[in-house]
Amino acid sequence: MEEIETRLFVEFHSSRIASMAAHAVTEMQGLRPGGLFAAEARISNLWEEACWALHEHSDTMAGEAASSVLRQFSQAEVSCLSDEELRLHCYLITDECDEEGMPWADAEAVASKVAEEIRWRASHFDIDRLSRG
């Protein structure tokens, strides 16, 4: 692939992953929290609850539950992609190919990338504003 094509392809991939992650976060912000940490923090939506669990809570089950929520939202985002777009993303992130040498349309591999981006956003969330006290 030519250098300019490679750069454009990588930029498209990165932009779409970021866009899907941003949409997932917006969706989570529109949902009520489960209330697990109501006594500990001022949490008003599912996104804040997941961020709190990933940042602050020593309960590994809560952290795993938050990670599961992120995966579910990532999978929902990726489920809307065409096989062609999935293949484009997989071309960059996997080495798996079909018998013709084309990358598989591996939705789980792409969802993992979206989940990584959501987790990165959660790691930069200012949880101090949620603290009671």
Image: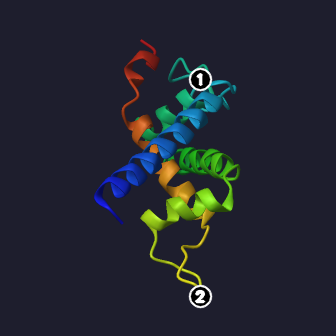
* Residues packed near mark 1 inside 10 Å, few (<14), some (14 to 19) or many (20 plus): few
For the N terminus, the image quarter is: bottom left
Distance between the Cα atoms at labels 1 and 2? 53 Å
Locate residue 103, reporting x and y percent. 54, 73
Residue shown at 56% from the left, 41% from the top: 20
Which is more toward the observer, 40 or 85?
A: 85
The quadrant in which residue 102 appears is bottom right
Q: Determine whether 39 is above or below 56 in the image.
A: above
Front residue of 36/22: it is 22
Residue 68 on image: x %, y %:
60, 51
Q: Mark 1 points at which residue?
A: 38
Residue drawn at the location 46% of the way across and 15% of the way down: 132
Mark 2: amino acid: Glu
Of residues 87 and 32, the one drawn nearer to the viewer in this rendering: 87
- Label 2, on which residue? 99
**Residue at left offset 51%, top offset 44%:** 16
- Residue 87: % across, % down: 57, 64
Q: Residue 129 carries which label?
A: none
Q: What residue type is labelled 1?
A: Ala
Residue 7 percent location from the top left of the image: 33, 52
